Amino acid sequence: MTVTSARITPVSDACGQADPAPGADPGRTSEIDTLGIDTQEIAAQHRDHVLQSWSVSGGPVHTITRAEGIWLWDETGRRIADMSSLMVCANLGHGHPRIAEAIAEQARRFCFMSPAFATEPKSRLAARLVALAGREHFARVMFTNGGAESNEHALRIARTVTGRTKVFSSYRSYHGATAGAAQATGDWRRLGAEQGAGAGFVKFLSPHPYQDGWSGEAADAAATERALADLERQLRFEGPETVAAIIVEPVVGANGVIIPPEGYLPGLRRLCDRYGILLIFDEVMTGFGRTGTMFAWQGFGVVPDLMTFAKGVDNAAVPLGGVLVSREIARFFEEHPLPGGLTYSGHTLACAAANAALDAYEQYGVLEHVAQTAPVLADFLDRMAREHECVGQVRHLGMFAAVELVSDREARTPLVGYRSSDPVMKRIIGRLYDRGFSTFGRENTLHVSPPLTITTQELEQVLPILDEVLGWVDREMLPARRAAAKDMED
């Protein structure tokens, strides 16, 4: 991957937030700081009244009372390192003053304006996003309220422009929870949305060299050749003239930070061009510096026809997402009406926050900072793969990383199976949290995707927690799992 080089912002100045005191403890603070919040009452109200997404409601919950930089404070006053940028969205860390000030200043003028009107925040943001993605490729933006709506409208745009109905997407993917986005999703979270769902969504297997058993120097080439040949055969069975779009994450996110093998994304581009299919890149997680370039596709040199975004565009300060469309698609909608819209499209406060976030990415040299700190994370994770029996593979690109856990390294046996109800991953994530390391996982992978502004000092302070917990998995979990597997064989 290529990473833009420029002046390196001093680490202590990244995002305009100061380093913590040397040797600061990521655990409990010197005094409980809950800002006067009755945390027990708040937790009880959450348990009793909130429908918890992707989970059974009414269970235990932590209450967060404060967040600043890479740190969260919970109901005990304990300070926790946010090592997943929440849901890979707080790219600039928490409590960024520039973003807070931009929201407050815009709120004093007006908070919201109908999408039919031009406003300074929305118009300026649209022009800046087109410039960041490349005016030679893109021309217009449709704003939404988040990633799912962005993918939903990208699919609708593709079907409208092509006059075709089918959409191809990978099993190893997540594109959102609205109707169309959920049906484009490949992992098990799509299943609820498929009840009475519309037709036209086709799944294919994208390459995962590690889980597919490839190894050695020729792994990328072999995985790419097989995956593209299988996909083209499937397109022919479905009738390529009926396929509007192929939607993929350029680097698979929630399903394990799966970096595509060399040649795969260029091969997808060639297939789409061959059959007149639009290529959609879902950059909801990977966008805005996460992989070391502003958008992940820029590191691979493969330009999509449509690109969706959310999360990092405004540091998740206010719900915001969007779809960037190519110059050709933009011209189509200069002659045909767009079949869609949202009350809050281009919400004024959200666009003000996004402009402030883009200012921060640029003025504090966040991409250059990632170029400086990503090798620290990569070196640590590579060492974890060498030293821990439970680690089958680590994958990292920029500040986007995952640890794949296994019970048998030689056989590459996942620590937990697909859609397993085994609570082992919850135990591991809970143990990390109890030691001051907050993250999430999917199936048998742990995500390590901290705010892009994390300093080298903070990485060196927090990452040993992961080392400790992986050692606990080696000692306490693997022997029991191997014994159970042997008993089943006998």
Image (cartoon, rainbow, N blue to C red):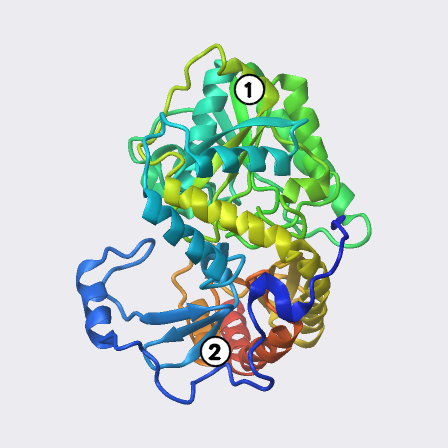
Mark 2, secondary structure of its residue: loop
Q: How many marks?
A: 2
Q: Is residue 281 visible?
A: no
Instruction: Determine which quarter of the picture holds residue 459.
Output: bottom right
Q: Residue at x 43, y 29 (%)?
A: 153
Left or right: residue 316 compared with residue 193: right
Label ID, residue 436: 2
Q: Amino acid at mark 2?
A: Gly
The residue that label 1 is drawn on is: 329
- Image: 404 above or below 125: below
Name the image quarter holding residue 234: top right
Residue at 41%, 33% in the rendered image: 119
- Residue 430: % across, % down: 42, 74
In the displayed structure image, the side of residue 133 where residue 26 appears, left or right: left
Give the x, y percent position of residue 96: 48, 61
Q: Horizontal and vertical percent for residue 71?
A: 47, 72
Vertical placement of residue 294 versus 345, above or below: below
How far is disc 2 from disc 1 in space, using C-alphas? 47 Å
